[in-house]
Amino acid sequence: MTAEIITIGDEILIGQTVDTNSTFIAKEFNKIGLSINRISSIKDSESDILTTLNSCLNYSDIVIVTGGLGPTNDDITKNTLLKFFNDKLITDHNVLDNIKFIWKKYIKQPLLQVNIDQSLVPSKAHVFLNTKGSAPGLWLQKNNTIFVFLPGVPFEMKSLIKDSIIPKILKEFSLPHILHKTILTYGMGESSIAEIIKNWEDSLPVEISLAYLPSLGRVKLRLSTKGDDLNKIIDNIQFQVDKLLPLIKDIFVGYEEDESIEKLISNELIKNNSTISIAESFTGGKISDSLVSIAGASTFFKGGVVCYSTESKINTLKVNLDLIEKYSVVSSQVVESMAVKTKELFNSDYGLATTGNAGPNKGDSSKEIGTVFIGIATPKEVFSFEFNFGNSRERVTNKAVNKSFELLLKELLKN
Amino acid sequence: MTAEIITIGDEILIGQTVDTNSTFIAKEFNKIGLSINRISSIKDSESDILTTLNSCLNYSDIVIVTGGLGPTNDDITKNTLLKFFNDKLITDHNVLDNIKFIWKKYIKQPLLQVNIDQSLVPSKAHVFLNTKGSAPGLWLQKNNTIFVFLPGVPFEMKSLIKDSIIPKILKEFSLPHILHKTILTYGMGESSIAEIIKNWEDSLPVEISLAYLPSLGRVKLRLSTKGDDLNKIIDNIQFQVDKLLPLIKDIFVGYEEDESIEKLISNELIKNNSTISIAESFTGGKISDSLVSIAGASTFFKGGVVCYSTESKINTLKVNLDLIEKYSVVSSQVVESMAVKTKELFNSDYGLATTGNAGPNKGDSSKEIGTVFIGIATPKEVFSFEFNFGNSRERVTNKAVNKSFELLLKELLKN
């Protein structure tokens, strides 16, 4: 069984919108053992849609098509699929009732004819109600391939995939298990890692594949396999991981399950009954935001200060002016003081702070662009690290956030 | 002239990585008048790569392929393209010198054989040096189609596209101008907008297309056209925009050029010589971060506090405990106090604050999940708004951030 995803919409092809819908669908399908062959984005054009749908017939068992089902004139998917399936539209009264209900309860605006027309569906389609919007999900078959059409609005699409499409697929088909295990490493490049683990990699069985995913100072190593016996494939992957870990013990920081390094940090903080607060200069709130995004953040996150200006470091965070004048605002002394002061301000066990010159201009410090200091105050001590992350503002910021999490997790794992 | 983009890498097909490379390339190509026909993501598999490259021959003039050029065993693009072009590898000494230079200056680790092998290139390729990494860009032709192979690491790919590939395309081909103008509206659904602008939309000339892009409380209206005479197409679009604006004056907030509503806000603040500070509860630093990300933020952004816990609202921001006990922490009274207190704390002209129950649990307030208050303190007054943004934590947060920017911009535009 193989699947593919097609997104319809000019906004992706002109670079206005990032295609996150496909990422979501691919991830959910992997969880139920359905591999994605191909993801395509095409224009709101009848000929392109028809060409692409035809190309799926000998290529995939299930095709998920999103987008182009809205009520406005630029949405042409529904009329195009009538041609592909040689079908006609009929009113689905459940869909109509659902639209009337949504308009009355949430939209609270007049129900227009274009909204009512959303209840017209192809007569051959199995229809899935969309409880969050007006365009239903449509399941149709041609030859041996199933085509599922879904609205492109992310939260409508997600709810249809989870609540309707996946249950239907699981009912209709028997699927294998797909297992990925991703190991997070920090501090070494991919070719050096490959050199260290060469013998292990060469001895991997054919049914287990390895991928290297380098990004901003970290490399993820992903092991993937597939099989009908879940316990057996879990054991097979674990057997390889157990052989791998001793080889990479200096750079290993954890696993990426569905979750990130922030989640690993939150697990450690919660386990130790510890709290943290954050003082951010050029990282602008990114570190706080990543931590607050974790469910249950209130148990370990006490607060954050975004003190981008020197003035706010002095007035709000109460960093000593003398320290700034003596060492400059981008210095180990200042970042350590920021870490300690935020810890005091929010009465937390740990304080994490960043200061740096992310560019494009040097700001209130003469330090070279790309210079970053990260400070960590623990219940016992305070220390800091200096880095240079290059001259792209966005990269400097993102590398500093990643590095902050890496250093913090390493510290927490010492306990 | 049409182009297409192919990304190679299992990480996209299993949903581990979002394909932002294609978005970048599509946007840059649009700027030079090159339309993207199709974007495909395929696996690191020889047969899939060959099938897809073959499918491009009668479909596109230029094909950009990213990914699979790294030094590790999971990268198979280079060996596969040798088959497709019936070619062999030769050493490119400029590439080798570049690799040696990068390793000496930045990597500072031993140069391994796999790194040296990155200087092996197909003999028929026009080679572009990659000054940021070891895999060069490769430009090859088959029949009438040009294939360009680039590394998948975003900052290496971006630099090659901007500094090498686009100049080469502009030198080789004469391209039309593509123009998009995107209008930002807030506060009305797409079908109601379509109703209001129906006559205008029906009278649009065929060479101008209109798209509706709804998302989280806002709808973007995008006008697109193409032509050889830039001034003429600019005039044509402006003529239509001038007719459209009076129809949507209550919901129009500005244009999306390359930039966002945050940029419009920063423009207004800078123009008025005003400053702002932010107090965020459940939005966790997202608002501060969006503002700090704008170049020149230091001129208008004074600072932010992430006071997620009730304790930090009292101790750090100095919101009155009595107010919280009387009205609850999720209330107009508290959000207005937060806006005023952050303005005082950072000595700014404006203060913006959020508080709410984003779920999944109710936290320190009995208000319904999804309830959000947004407060704005101006130099003259303070006011607030109440919303319910539903029961998905992520959506509630993102809608609140969007709505905060919308309300703030409206306030700033009054001046």
Image (spheres, coloured by chain):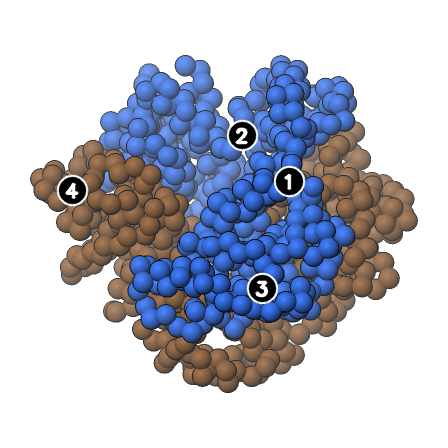
Chain colours: A brown, B blue
Q: Is there one chain holding both mark 1 and mark 2? A: yes
| Residue indicated by mark 1 | B173
Compared with A314, B237 (above or below) is above
What percent of the width, then of the height, locates residue A166? 68, 60
| Residue indicated by mark 4 | A328
Is residue A65 or residue A265 the one in the foreground?
A65
Which mark is first along the chain, 2 or 1?
Answer: 1
Q: What residue type is labelled 4?
A: Ser
Distance from the alpha carbon under mark 1 to that under mark 2: 29 Å
Q: What residue type is labelled 2?
A: Glu
Quarter of the image holding residue B414?
A: top left
| Residue indicated by mark 3 | B123
Q: Which amino acid does label 1 sit on?
A: Phe
Q: Residue B256 carries which label?
A: 2
Compared with B254, A37 (above or below) is below
Q: Is there one chain holding both mark 4 and mark 3? A: no
Q: What residue type is labelled 3?
A: Ser
What percent of the width, then of the height, locates residue A179? 57, 72
Is residue B330 or residue B86 the one in the foreground?
B86
* Residue visible at 28% across and 44% down in the picture: A369
Q: In this view, does B73 lie to the left or right of A249?
A: right
What percent of the width, then of the height, locates residue A29? 64, 62
Secondary element at image label 2? strand
Distance from the alpha carbon under mark 4 to that under mark 3: 53 Å
Quarter of the image holding residue B198?
A: top right
Q: Visible in this render: residue B332?
A: yes
Instruction: Name the subunit of mark 3.
Output: B
* Residue visible at 90% across and 44% down in the picture: A88
